[in-house]
Image (cartoon, helix red, strand yellow):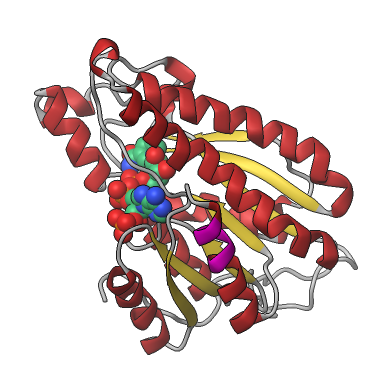
Protein backbone atom coordinates (compact mmCIF):
# COMPACT_ATOMS: atom_id res chain seq x y z
CA UNK A 1 0.00 0.00 0.00
CA UNK A 2 1.43 3.33 -1.02
CA UNK A 3 1.89 6.14 1.38
CA UNK A 4 0.86 4.78 4.78
CA UNK A 5 3.34 4.06 7.53
CA UNK A 6 1.73 3.28 10.88
CA UNK A 7 4.25 4.40 13.42
CA UNK A 8 4.52 5.69 16.92
CA UNK A 9 1.96 8.45 17.53
CA UNK A 10 3.23 11.66 16.09
CA UNK A 11 1.82 13.88 18.80
CA UNK A 12 4.52 14.31 21.36
CA UNK A 13 4.38 16.99 24.01
CA UNK A 14 7.84 17.61 25.39
CA UNK A 15 7.15 20.73 27.37
CA UNK A 16 7.17 20.91 31.15
CA UNK A 17 6.40 23.53 33.79
CA UNK A 18 4.00 25.31 31.43
CA UNK A 19 0.70 24.46 33.04
CA UNK A 20 -0.65 21.81 35.32
CA UNK A 21 -3.17 21.10 32.57
CA UNK A 22 -0.53 19.80 30.18
CA UNK A 23 0.23 16.06 30.05
CA UNK A 24 3.48 14.81 31.61
CA UNK A 25 6.76 15.56 29.87
CA UNK A 26 7.32 13.59 26.66
CA UNK A 27 4.15 11.56 27.09
CA UNK A 28 3.15 10.09 23.75
CA UNK A 29 -0.45 10.82 22.87
CA UNK A 30 -2.19 9.31 19.86
CA UNK A 31 -4.68 11.94 18.89
CA UNK A 32 -7.44 9.51 17.92
CA UNK A 33 -6.65 6.58 20.16
CA UNK A 34 -9.80 4.60 20.96
CA UNK A 35 -11.90 6.52 18.43
CA UNK A 36 -13.96 5.08 15.58
CA UNK A 37 -14.17 7.06 12.34
CA UNK A 38 -16.29 6.60 9.24
CA UNK A 39 -14.70 8.27 6.21
CA UNK A 40 -16.99 8.16 3.20
CA UNK A 41 -15.28 8.06 -0.18
CA UNK A 42 -12.07 6.64 1.32
CA UNK A 43 -11.29 4.11 -1.41
CA UNK A 44 -9.00 6.70 -2.99
CA UNK A 45 -8.02 10.36 -3.14
CA UNK A 46 -8.37 12.72 -0.20
CA UNK A 47 -10.65 10.38 1.76
CA UNK A 48 -8.10 7.61 1.61
CA UNK A 49 -5.31 9.88 2.86
CA UNK A 50 -7.56 11.09 5.70
CA UNK A 51 -8.55 7.54 6.71
CA UNK A 52 -4.93 6.39 6.66
CA UNK A 53 -3.81 9.34 8.79
CA UNK A 54 -6.63 8.69 11.27
CA UNK A 55 -5.45 5.06 11.49
CA UNK A 56 -1.90 6.22 12.14
CA UNK A 57 -3.29 8.32 14.98
CA UNK A 58 -4.96 5.30 16.56
CA UNK A 59 -8.51 5.39 15.18
CA UNK A 60 -10.38 2.36 13.91
CA UNK A 61 -11.53 3.43 10.47
CA UNK A 62 -14.42 2.48 8.21
CA UNK A 63 -13.31 2.61 4.58
CA UNK A 64 -16.23 3.38 2.29
CA UNK A 65 -16.45 3.05 -1.48
CA UNK A 66 -19.58 3.97 -3.38
CA UNK A 67 -19.07 1.36 -6.08
CA UNK A 68 -16.63 -1.38 -5.11
CA UNK A 69 -16.15 -3.45 -1.97
CA UNK A 70 -12.81 -4.60 -3.41
CA UNK A 71 -11.58 -1.01 -3.61
CA UNK A 72 -12.51 -0.46 0.04
CA UNK A 73 -10.89 -3.78 0.96
CA UNK A 74 -7.60 -2.83 -0.69
CA UNK A 75 -7.28 0.29 1.51
CA UNK A 76 -8.56 -1.50 4.60
CA UNK A 77 -6.13 -4.41 4.20
CA UNK A 78 -3.23 -2.00 3.84
CA UNK A 79 -4.15 -0.38 7.15
CA UNK A 80 -4.52 -3.76 8.88
CA UNK A 81 -1.17 -4.93 7.49
CA UNK A 82 0.41 -1.97 9.26
CA UNK A 83 -1.25 -2.87 12.56
CA UNK A 84 -4.32 -0.63 12.30
CA UNK A 85 -8.01 -1.53 12.54
CA UNK A 86 -10.27 -1.04 9.54
CA UNK A 87 -13.60 -2.17 8.13
CA UNK A 88 -14.27 -2.07 4.38
CA UNK A 89 -17.80 -1.17 3.29
CA UNK A 90 -19.51 -0.56 -0.03
CA UNK A 91 -22.22 2.06 0.48
CA UNK A 92 -23.73 4.62 -1.86
CA UNK A 93 -24.18 7.62 0.45
CA UNK A 94 -27.15 8.86 -1.58
CA UNK A 95 -29.21 5.82 -0.54
CA UNK A 96 -30.62 5.77 2.98
CA UNK A 97 -30.73 1.96 3.14
CA UNK A 98 -27.03 1.66 2.24
CA UNK A 99 -26.08 4.39 4.72
CA UNK A 100 -27.98 2.53 7.44
CA UNK A 101 -26.19 -0.71 6.54
CA UNK A 102 -22.83 1.14 6.70
CA UNK A 103 -23.61 2.46 10.18
CA UNK A 104 -24.96 -0.90 11.38
CA UNK A 105 -21.78 -2.64 10.17
CA UNK A 106 -19.67 -0.02 11.98
CA UNK A 107 -21.49 -0.44 15.27
CA UNK A 108 -21.47 -4.25 14.97
CA UNK A 109 -17.71 -4.28 14.53
CA UNK A 110 -16.50 -1.33 16.62
CA UNK A 111 -19.47 -0.63 18.99
CA UNK A 112 -19.27 3.17 18.71
CA UNK A 113 -18.98 6.03 16.22
CA UNK A 114 -16.95 9.09 17.18
CA UNK A 115 -16.06 10.73 13.88
CA UNK A 116 -17.82 11.07 10.53
CA UNK A 117 -16.08 12.56 7.49
CA UNK A 118 -18.63 13.33 4.78
CA UNK A 119 -16.10 13.20 1.97
CA UNK A 120 -17.72 11.12 -0.81
CA UNK A 121 -18.10 13.01 -4.05
CA UNK A 122 -18.09 13.11 -7.83
CA UNK A 123 -17.65 15.81 -10.42
CA UNK A 124 -19.03 16.18 -13.94
CA UNK A 125 -18.15 19.64 -15.30
CA UNK A 126 -20.69 20.88 -17.79
CA UNK A 127 -22.21 24.12 -19.03
CA UNK A 128 -25.30 25.18 -17.08
CA UNK A 129 -27.67 24.56 -19.99
CA UNK A 130 -26.20 21.13 -20.69
CA UNK A 131 -26.85 19.75 -17.22
CA UNK A 132 -29.66 17.23 -17.38
CA UNK A 133 -32.21 16.81 -14.64
CA UNK A 134 -30.73 13.38 -13.97
CA UNK A 135 -27.21 14.76 -13.53
CA UNK A 136 -28.51 17.58 -11.29
CA UNK A 137 -30.30 15.08 -9.05
CA UNK A 138 -27.27 12.75 -8.89
CA UNK A 139 -24.93 15.58 -7.91
CA UNK A 140 -27.25 16.92 -5.20
CA UNK A 141 -28.04 13.40 -3.98
CA UNK A 142 -24.44 12.24 -3.58
CA UNK A 143 -23.06 15.44 -2.07
CA UNK A 144 -25.83 17.21 -0.18
CA UNK A 145 -28.33 14.46 0.52
CA UNK A 146 -25.49 12.03 1.23
CA UNK A 147 -24.09 14.43 3.80
CA UNK A 148 -27.52 14.71 5.44
CA UNK A 149 -28.21 10.96 5.38
CA UNK A 150 -24.85 10.05 6.93
CA UNK A 151 -25.17 12.78 9.56
CA UNK A 152 -28.68 11.68 10.45
CA UNK A 153 -27.54 8.07 10.75
CA UNK A 154 -24.57 8.65 13.08
CA UNK A 155 -25.87 11.43 15.32
CA UNK A 156 -27.97 9.18 17.62
CA UNK A 157 -24.80 7.25 18.50
CA UNK A 158 -22.84 10.44 19.10
CA UNK A 159 -25.65 11.86 21.25
CA UNK A 160 -25.62 8.67 23.35
CA UNK A 161 -21.84 9.01 23.71
CA UNK A 162 -22.20 12.76 24.47
CA UNK A 163 -19.43 13.55 22.00
CA UNK A 164 -18.71 13.46 18.30
CA UNK A 165 -17.01 15.13 15.40
CA UNK A 166 -18.54 15.63 11.96
CA UNK A 167 -16.34 16.95 9.18
CA UNK A 168 -18.10 17.98 5.99
CA UNK A 169 -16.40 18.62 2.68
CA UNK A 170 -17.29 21.55 0.45
CA UNK A 171 -15.30 22.99 -2.47
CA UNK A 172 -13.85 26.29 -3.70
CA UNK A 173 -16.64 26.43 -6.28
CA UNK A 174 -19.15 26.88 -3.45
CA UNK A 175 -17.33 30.04 -2.36
CA UNK A 176 -16.42 31.50 -5.74
CA UNK A 177 -18.94 30.01 -8.18
CA UNK A 178 -16.70 28.20 -10.64
CA UNK A 179 -18.13 28.11 -14.16
CA UNK A 180 -19.34 24.71 -15.46
CA UNK A 181 -20.11 23.49 -11.94
CA UNK A 182 -23.66 24.75 -11.29
CA UNK A 183 -24.87 21.44 -9.82
CA UNK A 184 -21.65 20.69 -7.94
CA UNK A 185 -21.26 24.23 -6.57
CA UNK A 186 -24.90 24.37 -5.47
CA UNK A 187 -24.55 21.04 -3.65
CA UNK A 188 -21.29 22.14 -2.01
CA UNK A 189 -22.83 25.48 -1.01
CA UNK A 190 -25.67 23.57 0.61
CA UNK A 191 -23.11 21.58 2.58
CA UNK A 192 -21.76 24.79 4.10
CA UNK A 193 -25.28 25.77 5.19
CA UNK A 194 -25.91 22.28 6.55
CA UNK A 195 -22.64 22.47 8.49
CA UNK A 196 -23.71 25.65 10.26
CA UNK A 197 -27.21 24.41 11.08
CA UNK A 198 -25.91 21.07 12.37
CA UNK A 199 -23.22 22.83 14.42
CA UNK A 200 -25.86 24.91 16.20
CA UNK A 201 -28.30 22.04 16.75
CA UNK A 202 -25.73 19.50 17.91
CA UNK A 203 -23.38 21.63 20.03
CA UNK A 204 -25.27 20.92 23.24
CA UNK A 205 -24.62 17.19 22.74
CA UNK A 206 -20.86 17.69 22.51
CA UNK A 207 -20.87 17.24 18.75
CA UNK A 208 -18.73 19.65 16.74
CA UNK A 209 -19.48 20.08 13.04
CA UNK A 210 -16.99 21.78 10.71
CA UNK A 211 -16.33 21.96 7.01
CA UNK A 212 -13.15 21.68 4.93
CA UNK A 213 -12.79 23.30 1.50
CA UNK A 214 -9.98 21.24 -0.01
CA UNK A 215 -7.84 21.22 -3.10
CA UNK A 216 -5.52 18.29 -3.80
CA UNK A 217 -4.44 16.43 -6.87
CA UNK A 218 -6.63 13.34 -7.30
CA UNK A 219 -8.66 11.54 -9.96
CA UNK A 220 -11.22 14.32 -9.53
CA UNK A 221 -8.74 17.04 -10.43
CA UNK A 222 -7.68 15.05 -13.49
CA UNK A 223 -11.30 15.27 -14.71
CA UNK A 224 -11.29 19.04 -14.10
CA UNK A 225 -7.98 19.52 -15.91
CA UNK A 226 -9.12 17.47 -18.90
CA UNK A 227 -12.41 19.38 -19.19
CA UNK A 228 -10.83 22.82 -18.96
CA UNK A 229 -8.41 22.22 -21.82
CA UNK A 230 -5.91 24.45 -20.00
CA UNK A 231 -2.31 23.53 -19.44
CA UNK A 232 -1.00 22.41 -16.09
CA UNK A 233 0.98 25.66 -15.89
CA UNK A 234 -2.17 27.75 -16.45
CA UNK A 235 -3.93 25.87 -13.70
CA UNK A 236 -1.13 26.30 -11.22
CA UNK A 237 -1.08 30.01 -11.90
CA UNK A 238 -4.55 30.30 -10.31
CA UNK A 239 -3.16 29.26 -6.95
CA UNK A 240 -1.17 31.83 -4.94
CA UNK A 241 0.93 28.94 -3.62
CA UNK A 242 1.54 27.93 -7.23
CA UNK A 243 0.86 24.20 -6.99
CA UNK A 244 -1.59 21.44 -6.13
CA UNK A 245 -1.24 19.74 -2.76
CA UNK A 246 -1.02 15.98 -2.41
CA UNK A 247 -3.93 14.47 -0.42
CA UNK A 248 -1.49 13.54 2.38
CA UNK A 249 -0.52 17.19 2.72
CA UNK A 250 -4.05 18.37 3.52
CA UNK A 251 -5.17 15.37 5.62
CA UNK A 252 -3.80 16.92 8.88
CA UNK A 253 -6.48 19.61 8.64
CA UNK A 254 -9.14 16.89 8.85
CA UNK A 255 -7.22 15.43 11.78
CA UNK A 256 -7.38 18.79 13.54
CA UNK A 257 -11.17 18.85 13.20
CA UNK A 258 -11.41 15.21 14.34
CA UNK A 259 -9.23 15.63 17.41
CA UNK A 260 -9.47 17.31 20.81
CA UNK A 261 -7.37 20.15 19.42
CA UNK A 262 -10.51 21.61 17.83
CA UNK A 263 -12.69 21.21 20.92
CA UNK A 264 -13.71 24.89 20.89
CA UNK A 265 -14.24 25.08 17.12
CA UNK A 266 -17.61 24.42 15.51
CA UNK A 267 -19.58 25.60 12.50
CA UNK A 268 -16.42 26.75 10.73
CA UNK A 269 -15.41 26.53 7.09
CA UNK A 270 -11.67 26.20 6.48
CA UNK A 271 -10.20 26.41 2.98
CA UNK A 272 -7.09 24.31 2.43
CA UNK A 273 -6.71 25.35 -1.16
CA UNK A 274 -3.34 26.95 -1.76
CA UNK A 275 -4.98 30.37 -1.50
CA UNK A 276 -7.39 29.85 -4.42
CA UNK A 277 -10.33 31.41 -2.59
CA UNK A 278 -8.51 34.45 -1.22
N1 LIG B 1 -9.58 17.05 -5.23
C1 LIG B 1 -9.89 18.33 -5.11
O1 LIG B 1 -9.11 19.24 -5.48
C2 LIG B 1 -11.20 18.74 -4.51
C3 LIG B 1 -11.58 20.08 -4.57
C4 LIG B 1 -12.77 20.46 -3.97
C5 LIG B 1 -13.55 19.55 -3.30
N2 LIG B 1 -13.17 18.22 -3.27
C6 LIG B 1 -14.05 17.30 -2.58
O2 LIG B 1 -13.28 16.42 -1.79
C7 LIG B 1 -13.92 15.13 -1.75
C8 LIG B 1 -12.92 14.07 -2.18
O3 LIG B 1 -12.51 14.35 -3.49
P1 LIG B 1 -11.32 13.57 -4.22
O4 LIG B 1 -10.64 14.55 -5.07
O5 LIG B 1 -10.54 12.77 -3.24
O6 LIG B 1 -12.17 12.60 -5.18
P2 LIG B 1 -11.84 11.15 -5.78
O7 LIG B 1 -10.39 10.87 -5.73
O8 LIG B 1 -12.56 11.09 -7.07
O9 LIG B 1 -12.56 10.17 -4.73
C9 LIG B 1 -13.95 10.24 -4.56
C10 LIG B 1 -14.37 9.21 -3.53
O10 LIG B 1 -15.79 9.33 -3.35
C11 LIG B 1 -16.37 8.04 -3.48
N3 LIG B 1 -17.75 8.12 -3.96
C12 LIG B 1 -18.20 8.65 -5.13
N4 LIG B 1 -19.53 8.53 -5.21
C13 LIG B 1 -19.92 7.93 -4.06
C14 LIG B 1 -21.17 7.53 -3.53
N5 LIG B 1 -22.32 7.73 -4.20
N6 LIG B 1 -21.21 6.93 -2.32
C15 LIG B 1 -20.07 6.72 -1.62
N7 LIG B 1 -18.85 7.07 -2.07
C16 LIG B 1 -18.79 7.66 -3.27
C17 LIG B 1 -15.45 7.30 -4.42
O11 LIG B 1 -15.62 5.90 -4.24
P3 LIG B 1 -15.57 4.83 -5.46
O12 LIG B 1 -14.96 5.52 -6.65
O13 LIG B 1 -14.73 3.72 -4.91
O14 LIG B 1 -16.99 4.44 -5.67
C18 LIG B 1 -14.10 7.79 -3.96
O15 LIG B 1 -13.68 7.04 -2.84
C19 LIG B 1 -15.15 15.25 -2.64
O16 LIG B 1 -16.28 15.54 -1.86
C20 LIG B 1 -14.82 16.43 -3.54
O17 LIG B 1 -15.97 17.05 -4.04
C21 LIG B 1 -12.02 17.82 -3.85
Rendering quarter of residue 274: top left
Using the image as rendered, state which of residue 154 and residue 137 is in the foreground.
Answer: 137
Q: Residue at x 56, y 57 (%)?
A: 255
Q: Is residue 79 left or right of residue 11?
A: left
In the rendered image, the quadrant that contains the N terminus is: bottom left
Residue 249 seen in render: no
Residue furthest to the top in view is: 129
Q: Residue at x 45, y 32 (%)?
A: 140
Q: Is residue 94 left or right of residue 232?
A: right
Residue 54 seen in render: yes
Where residue 103 appears, as percent x and y from the top left, is 60, 67
In this rendering, the count of numbered labels is 0
- Residue 73 is a magenta residue: no
- Residue 100 is a magenta residue: yes
Q: Residue at x 79, y 46 (%)?
A: 264
Q: Residue at x 25, y 71 (%)?
A: 2
Query: Predominant secondary structure in magenta?
Result: helix
Using the image as rendered, state which of residue 44 and residue 150 is in the foreground.
Answer: 150
Magenta stretch, residue numbers: 97-101
Where residue 144 appears, as percent x and y from the top left, is 52, 36
Where residue 101 appears, as percent x and y from the top left, is 55, 67
Using the image as rendered, state which of residue 260 and residue 162 is in the foreground.
Answer: 162
Where residue 171 appears, as percent x and y from the top left, is 44, 32
| Above or below, comparing residue 101 to residue 110 in the picture | above
Rendering quarter of residue 47: bottom left
Amino acid sequence: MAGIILREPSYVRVTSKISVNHPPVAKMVSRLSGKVAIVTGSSKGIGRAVAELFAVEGASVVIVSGSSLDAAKAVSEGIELQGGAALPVKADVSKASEVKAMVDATVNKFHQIDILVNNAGITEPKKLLEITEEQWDRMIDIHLKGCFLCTRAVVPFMVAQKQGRIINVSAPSALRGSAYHADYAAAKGGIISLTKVAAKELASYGINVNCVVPVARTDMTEIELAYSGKSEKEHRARYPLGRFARPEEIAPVYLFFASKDSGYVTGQVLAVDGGLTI
